[in-house]
Image (spheres, rainbow, N blue to C red):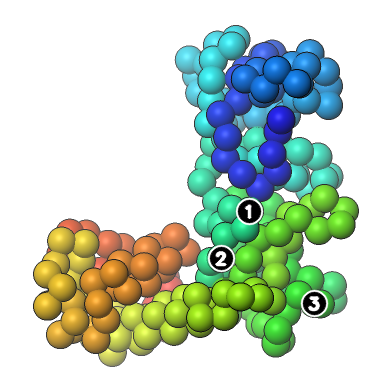
Amino acid sequence: MIELGKRQMLTIVKIAEHGAYLADTVNKDTDPESEESRVLLPKKELPEDAMYMDPIDVFIYRDSKDRLIATTREPLIKLGEVSALKVKDVSNIGAFLDWGLEKDLFLPFKEQKEKVSKGDVVPVRLYVDKSKRLCATMWVKGDEKKTGDYLKNATLLTEILEKNGGALSVGDKSSPEKIMKMTGMSKNEFKKAAGNLYKQRLVRITEDSIELIKDNKR
């Protein structure tokens, strides 16, 4: 079964000029020869050495024409997850978020707790709407603390970096004591906040440093 919004291991069942068709050959209830049970992995994402019946790990979403499509890229959020994403644009029907894929993630007006603007970073959950399309929602019932922590720690770490010229001498391998002294966060809180900023391509992280990416400094 091909699952929308999730990463899964599929099998190459046909290689064509424009890419490879993938199917779930492990699930015996699906027919890999059926058009409905296949999904396209575009040629530009197909490994050069890919062959018929090779397994490949992909994420499934919908393209601009609402067709199921596979990608080897890692999205910033998957089905059911909560993450803080950056608003790329706002239109008269809603907002569009950067989630690391070619087609931006739609955040409808009705799913916004408050008005969002281009450049905002907002905590959202990924869900499938009634039309079987992936969308984002800011209404995350039962996860208020989790989304609050996302926003608080992403925002706090960014402010600390900006006040220190865009960089700090703490990273993945720094001691909990040093991280607490420089950021006021536990090591676990720091790693989650730094990881979230990294996913949004806002910072560079090494074993002993974190730095705002120049283009994103205010």
Question: Is 170 situated above or below 7?
Answer: below
- Residue occupied by mark 1: 79
How many angstroms separate mark 3 from mark 1 (CA)? 20 Å
How many angstroms separate mark 2 from mark 3 (CA)? 18 Å
- Residue occupied by mark 3: 109
Residue count near mark 3 (Cα–Cα under 10 Å), binned few <14, some 14–19, many ≥20: some
On the image, the x and y values in percent for residue 129 come to: 81, 58
The quarter of the displayed image where residue 120 is located: bottom right
Q: Residue at x 53, y 76 (%)?
A: 147
Which quarter of the image is occupied by the N terminus? top right
Question: Is 121 situated above or below 71?
Answer: below
Amino acid type of disc 1? Leu
How many angstroms separate mark 2 from mark 1 (CA)? 9 Å
Q: Residue at x 73, y 79 (%)?
A: 112
On the image, the x and y values in percent for residue 156 come to: 37, 85
Give whichever of discs 2 and 3 has the lower sequence position: 2
- Contact (CB < 8 A) between labels 2 and 1? no
Amino acid type of disc 3? Phe
Label 3: state its secondary structure.
helix
Label 2: state its secondary structure.
strand
- Residue occupied by mark 2: 82
- Contact (CB < 8 A) between labels 2 and 3? no
